[in-house]
Amino acid sequence: MSQKPEDLFKNIISHSKEYGFIFQSSEIYDGLSAVYDYGQLGAELKKNIRDYWWKAMVQLHENIVGIDAAIFMHPTTWKASGHVDAFNDPLIDNKDSKKRYRADVLIEDHVAKIEDKIKKEVEKAAKRFENFDETMFRATNGRVKEYQDKIDAINLRFKTALNDNNLEEVKQIIVDLEIVCPISGSRNWTDVRQFNLMFSTSMGSVSEDANTIYLRPETAQGIFVNYLNVQKTGRMKIPFGIAQTGKAFRNEIVARQFIFRMREFEQMEMQFFVKPGTEMEWYEYWKKARLNWHLSLGMGKEKYRYHDHLKLAHYANAACDIEHEFPFGFKELEGIHSRTDFDLKQHEQFSGKKLQYFDPELNQSYVPYVVETSVGLDRLFLSILSSALKEEVLEGGETRTLLSLPPALAPYKAAVFPLIKRDGLPELAEKIMNQLKFDYNITYDEKDAVGRRYRRQDAIGTPYCITVDHQSLEDNTVTVRHRDSMQQDRIRIEDLNAFLDERVSLKSLLKSIV
Ligand code: ATP
């Protein structure tokens, strides 16, 4: 049963709380805005996603290694990287509702609405004509062309304004497009201002300016400042990569989309160091490889698309996002950036230390170029959860809530049930738990009728339910019920490990991407 996107989003939030995936941080004190805690099942799912990313990057690539740098870094790091001066978002307030918005997001949302109109026209035409060719239709249909021209004009104007850092023009675009505040409905806007997103604190007991340090707004800089340490001690040869997962902090202006935009979040980044001049090849390579990784999760190809950046960051010579269709539309999930030698050169300059690589093949030293892949773990979590959560109508009209997570990522790989609580069935179930627990996270449930236990496991994404019944005592077999098809098989207890290994291990996912 398909749900309206806004209902689906509300369901995801309440489902996350009800089943122990995600809680508002410090909820008993009414929460802290845009900060969330992962509960008992959320922590498992998040860890499994992180493990899959890590293994896909580090274990499957001989030339990629992983590190774990500290959150606090020398403050000069952020001067060198450009974050102190330029890690800003343009903000605008509505004077009536007193709500604050990102000016760029208001414009992007306006463009998305026009895109929706095109989508609707295309869908209408597809219903009318057989052998419908969308490209031809886009080129020939007057109304659609008009919409597309509008989008192109807005994008061009917006891009120019951003590149010129012309905040007055950004405001003028909002005024000209007659964008209203969704809360007050008014167009009573303040001027657009830049707002630095870094959180700062002070180190040591004396609070002086000199002691100001920042909570890292990205994990990448921890990799750059360690690049030579890793290259030398790991005897790495270019091209090679350094991967890292860890917390990042941004004082986001607008933080109203659950774990999509948080003030404390986790990133999974990989910096790939290459010979200057080869960066575009690697940029294309990583664009494909990363999309392929997302597709391996089985959420559907139509849920992903590339989006080239309108405005390149100060460090990039090419950049694109892999966007995912969230319940509130297509939004950035991962960024692939060709960062040139900007960061390493800046760190050379600010630290006075050489960060060059001696290329034995060329017999020459150079500062490598960098291609980066950067994905938010929490955003990825949300993309997976929102694609997996479904309300299914079964034969007979009953509905079931199903979380069709990729089996390898599910918090529990299997649930073990004794059919009833006596006759030695719980004891045998416990034996099975002990047999499986060294390989997998398994859960046990003996409460309520089996049907209700199935429903509970469906709602948290457990791929297999193993039921121990009286026959099990006689022939050492159990019923294994599949989450998605609800089909049941009789399987020998001694074969259970191999059965699960084939279906729920990360190995199967990893094999699908090589
Ligand atoms: P956005 O345009 O959505 O603010 P960004 O372009 O600033 O994102 P990057 O700096 O490229 O994001 O960060 C890389 C990835 O980190 C993003 O693709 C996203 O998945 C994740 N990310 C960034 N900011 C947040 C946040 N506030 N909360 C959760 N994840 C985030």
Image (cartoon, helix red, strand yellow):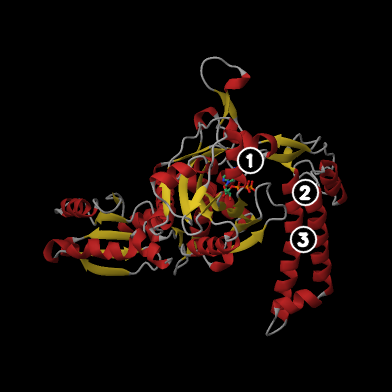
Q: Is mark 1 within 8 Å of ligand 1?
A: yes
Query: Can you tell which mark lies on residue 255?
Result: 1
Q: Residues within 10 Å of mark 3 (few under 14, many from 20)?
A: some
Residue at the spot x=30%, y=68% of the render? 488
Q: Earlier in the sequence, mark 1 or mark 3?
A: 3
Q: Is residue 1 visible?
A: no
Q: Earlier in the sequence, mark 2 or mark 3?
A: 3
Q: Position of residue 288 (x, y in %)?
A: 54, 65
Q: Residues within 10 Å of mark 1 (few under 14, many from 20)?
A: some
**Mark 3 falls on what kind of element?**
helix
Q: Position of residue 162 (x, y in %)?
A: 77, 47
**Mark 1 falls on what kind of element?**
loop
Query: Can you tell which mark lies on residue 114?
Result: 3
**Residue 364 appears left or right of 494:** right
Residue 74 lies in quadrant:
top right
2 vs 3, front mark:
2
Residue at the spot x=85%, y=42% of the render? 168
Tag 2: amino acid = Asn
Q: Position of residue 143 (x, y in %)?
A: 83, 70
In the displayed image of the protein, which residue is found farthest to the left?
Answer: 474
Q: Quadrant of the N terminus?
A: bottom right
Q: Which residue is mark 2?
A: 163
**Residue 330 appears left or right of 470:** right
Q: Is residue 77 visible?
A: yes
Identify whether 366 is placed above or below 397. Answer: above
Residue at the spot x=74%, y=62% of the render? 115
Q: Position of residue 504 (x, y in %)?
A: 34, 61
Residue 152 lies in quadrant:
bottom right
Spatial CA distance of label 1 from label 3 is 24 Å
Spatial CA distance of label 2 from label 3 is 23 Å
